[in-house]
Structure formats: structure tokens, C-alpha cells
Amino acid sequence: MPTIQHADSYYAASANPSPDRPALSGSTRTDVCVIGAGFTGISAGLFLAEQGFKVTVLEAARVGWGASGRNGGQIVNSYSRDIDVIERTAAPEQAALLGKMAFEGAQIIRQRVARYGIQCDLKDGGIFAALTGKQLDHLEQQQRLWERYGNDKLSLLDQADIARRVGSSRYVGGLLDMSGGHIHPLNLVLGEAAALESLGGVIHEQSAVTRIEHGQPATVHTADGQVEARFVIVAGNAYLGNLLPQLAAKSMPCGTQVITTEALDEDLALSLLPQDDCVEDCNYLLDYYRLSADRRLIYGGGVTYGARDPANVEALIRPKLLKTFPQLEGVRIDYAWTGNFLLTLSRLPQVGRLGENIYYSQGCSGHGVTYTHLAGKVLAEALRGQAERFDAFASLPHYPFPGGRLLRVPFTAMGAWYYQMRDKFGI
Ligand SMILES: Cc1cc2nc3c(=O)[nH]c(=O)nc-3n(C[C@H](O)[C@H](O)[C@H](O)COP(=O)(O)OP(=O)(O)OC[C@H]3O[C@@H](n4cnc5c(N)ncnc54)[C@H](O)[C@@H]3O)c2cc1C
């Protein structure tokens, strides 16, 4: 079978050295078999290895090949729907528990980077940028909400403040979160994978799981081998396909695209983002951007429902970049790529168990860098028999997409169009 390499991204081109891991061949036994070597799978595996579990990870392509190695690198706190939505829909104790966890993922990332000496260009500081007065009002409410749950690193920015931090005239204000920030995501997951291996964990790349046999132990099959495991963690997210139809039925892979400019002259880079913050705007279909360590602008946006790969990513994203920074007219784009995240109807993650010993977490719907790190911890707790926090996530309702696998794409695109129009007209 041909080997699968990383997408042709800026991250792959600037990745720290990492070995090719051999594909699984023959039979082996382990405590925990993890399917998927993105942030969710590697985070769970690393927590479990730290606690003495024998962990085997099976990855269809390479470590970090999926969304985790291609994303905007923005450490965004909370979930894709915020805690106020959870407060309105969940029981009060459950909402309180989920609210308390909303800032933990960012802490886990920082602890891991420090503990294992991971070189991933970690920077503090993320801005939510408001394009309208209505969005700024919403950010003010968000600040109060997040402060209530313990985030004391927030400052509201008025138009003059944001102009000092972002060299674009599009914004009326923003919310700065110094517990947010940014990283080189592929280097983070590669560093975490190396940490897992240093604790005895085993990772097989080019090892797509083709079948899971329920039982105690469960048996996880690839084309050339099988793993018997007391527990299985399914962490394939948007790339899982139809391996477990019950997970595919309630989620939808979506694409989002990223471009990266040539390295910018120091003065120009400083004029765009003088404090080196990362930025995402408050639109439903949002733009997100930041500088790389070598002063390239990494700019992402757009959504393709159903995850069809667009023919020309640069043609899609360059106009968005120029709308924000017209001063970059003529700048060269060195990299352009697409990646898939997994959307759920509620835009909240789906966490649960299939049978006795097969656990999953999926569908963080666009904001996953922090949540996936938290999910790894919560899954590891559940495997050790401490399921309170796992249960808080697991009892969030999971809805099937209207229209089923056939019509979910047009139905969702129509919904998104409605929200895009509301953003456009500021209503
Ligand atoms: C372009 C892009 C930009 C984004 N930007 C941001 C951002 O700036 N901030 C933020 O918070 N979130 C962002 N996200 C979302 C975030 O990246 C994801 O939510 C998160 O990385 C998901 O991690 P994961 O480990 O669950 O899935 P993935 O990283 O996708 O990993 C799943 C892995 O499972 C493997 N796999 C699947 N099926 C099998 C199988 N059968 N056998 C073996 N292996 C299998 C895949 O090969 C893949 O490597 C972005 C997403 C994309 C696509």
C-alpha cells in the first residue's frame, strides 16, 4: 500500500525531525489501543502512559496528519458553543462542571510544553475581533461569563485598543485573552507523541483500522495485524469515515482552508500584529490568523460542508486576507492547504462509550486545540474509573443531522448561509 505523507503545508515544511513509525504487523496485546494520532488520541495516550498503562496507537497516516497537524494553531478557550448555551440546556451541576473545565485544555498544553520541553513556538495572547457593535456587545457578555468561570486574563478592547494590536481597520473592538495564544500545532503533537514513546507507548503509522471486534479484550484489526486491548479509544474525528456508522450518523466532516505567506519583512510583520497575538473574528464563518515564528502570516477561513477539497485554496482565502490586510497586496503565498474538522448539530463535542470498553470523543466543531487536550485527560480518568467529568460530557445530547448522510450537506449549508447573511448585515 502506498504510504500517506503529510499535507503539503507550512507546518509539514517546518516540522521538527520525527521518525517514520513502522506499520502494525502481526498480533500484539496492550492495555489501551488508541485509534488516531491527533491531539485527542495522543493526549489520551500520554495521560494514560503517565499513569502506567501500556498504550498502543494506530494511525492511518502519520502522527498529526489530520486536523491536529494542519490547523490555525490558535489556542482558543471554551467550546465551539460557549458555556452560556450549556447553562441553558444542561442540568446546573453538569453545566458548572463543564464550565470549570473550559479553560483546562490551554493549561494542559502549557504544562506539556514545559514538562517535555516541546519546541512548538508557544505564544500567549489571543484576540476575538468584533466587526460590528453587536459582536462587541456579545464579547462583553463573554468576558463576564468566562470571568464567572475563573478566567482572569481577559481585557475588553475598544476600537483604539484593537487598532494598537491588529493593523486592520475592520474591527470595532475585541476581547483579548492572555490565557489563549498560539502554537505550531504539528510540532506540538509530534512532541507529545515523542513524550508518549519515552514512557513506553507504541505508535504505528500507516496502520488504518479496518474493524473493531467488541469483547473483553476487544480486538482492533488493520490490514496486516491486530491488537487485543482491555480498552479502545476512538479518536479518528473527521477522518474516521464509516468505521463506526453510529458515530458517522451524528456528525459531518467539514473542510476549512489555510494559506501562508512568504516570510514578511520585520517592520511589515510588526505592523500587522505588533504583540504577536493570534486573532479570530466573530463571524459565524470566521477568519483566523496569526504570525509564524519566521514572520509569515498564516491566514485561514471558510468552510466546505461535507469536506470536499476545494480546487484552488489560494483563490478562496487570499481575498479574505486582503480584505483584512489590503497592505499585503502582491505578497507571495508559499503554502495553501485544506483540513477537516468534525461538525455536530449542537456544535458541542460528542463523548461516550460503545459497549463496555470502547470510548470515543469527537466533533469539537472547529475549536478543538484546547478541547482535545482536555478530552484526553477526561477519557484517561474514565478508564481509571473516575467518570464524573466524562459523564458530564457524555450526557450532552447527540443529535443526528437532518437529512441523514444524503441531505445533511445542503441542509447545513443553508443554515450557514442564513447565519452568514446575519453577520453580513450586522443583525
Ligand atoms: C484547517 C483547520 C484549522 C483549524 N484551526 C483551529 C484553530 O486554530 N484552533 C482550534 O482550536 N481548532 C482549530 N481547528 C480544529 C482542530 O484542529 C481539531 O478540532 C482538532 O485538531 C481535532 O483533533 P483530533 O485528534 O480529534 O482529530 P485529528 O487531528 O483529525 O486526528 C484524527 C486522526 O485519526 C486518524 N484516523 C482516522 N481514522 C482512522 C482509522 N480508521 N485508523 C487509524 N487512524 C485513523 C487520522 O488519520 C488522523 O490523523 C482547525 C481545524 C482545521 C481542519
Image (cartoon, rainbow, N blue to C red):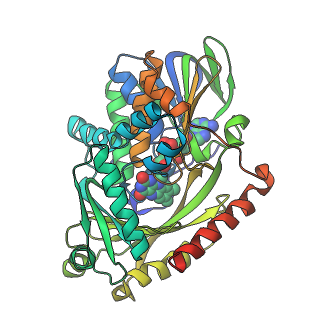
Q: Is residue 224 left or right of residue 365?
A: right
Give coordinates of residue 423: x percent, y percent: 52, 74
Q: Nearer the viewer, residue 16 or 122?
A: 122
Q: Residue at x 27, y 70 (%)?
A: 295
Compared to residue 406, the image places residue 228 above or below, namely above
Q: Quadrant of the N terminus?
A: top right
Q: On the image, which quarter does residue 214 sit in?
A: top right
Compared to residue 275, the image places residue 150 above or below, namely above
Q: Residue at x 37, y 81 (%)?
A: 170
Q: Nearer the viewer, residue 317 or 397?
A: 397
Q: Is residue 183 visible?
A: no
Q: Is residue 247 left or right of residue 71?
A: right
Q: Is residue 98 left or right of residue 124?
A: right
Give coordinates of residue 110: x percent, y percent: 25, 43
Q: Residue at x 37, y 53 (%)?
A: 76
Give coordinates of residue 137: x percent, y percent: 38, 68
Number of marks in the rendered image: 0
Give coordinates of residue 115: x percent, y percent: 22, 35
Q: Is residue 388 visible?
A: yes
